[in-house]
Amino acid sequence: MWPKEKGLQGFIAVIKECYSAVLDLARHLFRLFAFSFDLPEDYFGSMTTHLGGNARLIYFPPRKVLTSTTPGLEILNPSGQWHVASYIPDSLL
């Protein structure tokens, strides 16, 4: 369901372009996942040919972002050792 484009010329095209970019990113991430598991790069390819999904656009009013510098996330390396994922300011994990 799309809004009428009156006053929003190009809105639908932009959203579809964004959605397509997100799907491209998902496919790229699956190639990286395969690499990280020492699998062939196209291992997940057949599973990402027809990615389904829904996009829902929701407006959230601006607010102050509260971040935590307390470690909590740990990553298990291939040797079976856990490592703390350090906090990096202005980053996305």
Image (cartoon, helix red, strand yellow):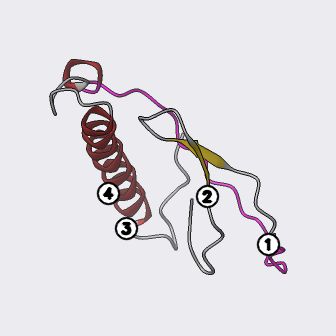
Q: Which of marks 3 and 1 precedes in the sequence? A: 3
Highlighted magenta segment, given as a residue range: 48-66
Label 3 vs label 4: CA separation? 11 Å
Q: Which disc number belongs to residue 10?
A: 3
Residue that badge 4 annotates: 17
> Where residue 60 sits: x, y (%)?
77, 65
Front label number (1 vs 2): 2
Amino acid type, label 1: Thr
Camera-side residue of 17 and 91: 91
User: Is 76 placed above or below 37 here?
Assistant: below
**Between discs 4 and 2, the one toward the N terminus:** 4
Residue located at (56% from left, 73% from top): 91
Disc sitting over residue 67 in the figure: 1
Distance Cα–Cα, label 1 vs label 3: 35 Å
Can you give x and y, in whole percent of width and height, for residue 7 in the image? 52, 74
> Dot 2 corresponds to which residue?
85
Percent coordinates x, y for residue 8 in the rendering: 49, 70
Would you say the residues marked 1 and 2 are in contact, meaning their CB atoms lie under 8 Å apart? Answer: no
> Main SS of the magenta segment?
loop
Residue type indicated by callout 3: Gly
Q: 10 Å neighbourhood of mark 1: few (<14), some, or many (≥20)?
A: few
Quarter of the image that includes the C terminus:
bottom right
- Disc 2 is placed on an element classified as loop
Characterize the local packing of mark 4: few (<14), some (14-19) or many (20 or more) Cα atoms within 10 angstroms.
few
Q: Amino acid at mark 2?
A: Ala
In the rendered structure, the answer to whether residue 70 lies left or right of residue 21 reads right
The alpha-carbon separation of the residues under discs 3 and 2 comes to 41 Å
Q: Residue at x 80, y 76 (%)?
A: 65
C-alpha span from label 4 to label 1: 31 Å
In the picture, the disc for residue 52 is none
Q: 44 left or right of 78?
A: left
